[in-house]
Image (tube, helix red, strand yellow):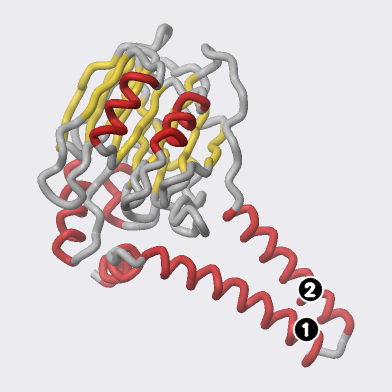
Amino acid sequence: MVNHFLAWLVMGFQSLAYATLSGALLVVGVALLLWWRGFAWLPLIGWSFTAAAVVVVIVLLVACMLVPTQPTARQLGEGVRVAHLNVLFYSNFAFAEKLAFVQQSGADVVSLVEVPEKLGELMIEQSGYPYHFQTSAPSTGRNLPMLTLSRWPLKVAHQWSPRAMAFTVQHPQTPFTFIQLHPQSPYTPNAFAKRNVELAALTSPTFPAPVVAVGDLNTTPWDNALHPLRQNLTFRGPWLPTFPSFMPLAPIDLVLSSPHWPTQNIQRVHVPGTDHLAIVANFPTPPKQP
């Protein structure tokens, strides 16, 4: 109960950007306080150097959290690369920039959520992916569909709702399951409860092939509501913050996969016109089911 209440406090308001900004300012404030106390109140040189070292470590950690990268080049056929992006940011659509990200990502499978109709049409027509699936618009919350793009044939394996889809991707060597998720944003207590119901439904079914799941989960990896996903899948890079894009401190765009199919690396990419960072994850060739 307490954990869910705290999760609602952290994740349940539309002003999450301001909360994460406050968190960043708190970290900077602690660093400045340590610096000041180290030099003003602790005259011993050893303490001064200790305080300075702590400040440097904090600054480096924050820098690593805030600075996104660009996808590394790869040859098609080298393992599997998946990309995910929440594309919408109010009225700032930046369609050309988002199309460019998809085209340049080098991803084999791409997950896009909160996709406006015109952007979805643009992606399907010009992204260069021969296979796609677009969900219907959800009936609650932000009424925008999800779109999956793929280099390989894909078919629907299971649909929990328009916010949760599972596909069988026909990889040339080993088919795998690709799960795309975007549960309800918990902007009110009622929406928070609906989001938890959606996440609880993910306990079944199980899939025989290797599985990768991506999405804007609208919560953090330590939320108990994600327990159904953790039963069969492992979080990859769970501490990489993706929201808000101007100062990312909340890890809500997440990657999970089967325990025997770990990522090789995960990168975050800044894409203009959205308040989320994109995620690009590289996997080895899908293994056979152990």
Is residue 113 toward the left or the right of residue 172 in the image?
A: left
Where is residue 262 drawn, in percent x and y?
49, 31
Q: Can you name the residue that lies furthest to the bottom here?
A: 41
Where is residue 203 drawn, in percent x and y?
21, 40
Where is residue 56 drawn, in percent x and y?
74, 66
Q: Quadrant of residue 54?
A: bottom right
Q: Amino acid at mark 1?
A: Gly
Where is residue 51 drawn, in percent x and y?
76, 77
Q: Nearer the viewer, residue 49 or 96?
A: 96
Compared to residue 217, the image places residue 222 above or below, namely: below
10 Å crowding of disc 1: few (<14), some (14-19), many (20+): many
Compared to residue 26, the image places residue 288 above or below, namely: above
| Residue of label 2 | 52
Q: Residue at x 31, y 22 (%)?
A: 124
SS at mark 2 in the image: helix
Is residue 244 toward the left or the right of residue 192 in the image?
A: right
| Quarter that holds the C terminus | top left
Compared to residue 1, the image places residue 282 above or below, namely: above
Q: Quadrant of residue 8?
A: bottom left
| Residue of label 1 | 38
SS at mark 1 in the image: helix
Q: Amino acid at mark 2?
A: Ala
- Do the numbered discs 2 and 1 sit on residues whose CB atoms are within 8 Å? yes
Q: Nearer the viewer, residue 31 or 132?
A: 132
| Quarter that holds the N terminus | bottom left
Q: Residue at x 61, y 29 (%)?
A: 72
Evaluate whether residue 102 shows in this view.
yes
Q: Earlier in the sequence, mark 2 or mark 1?
A: 1
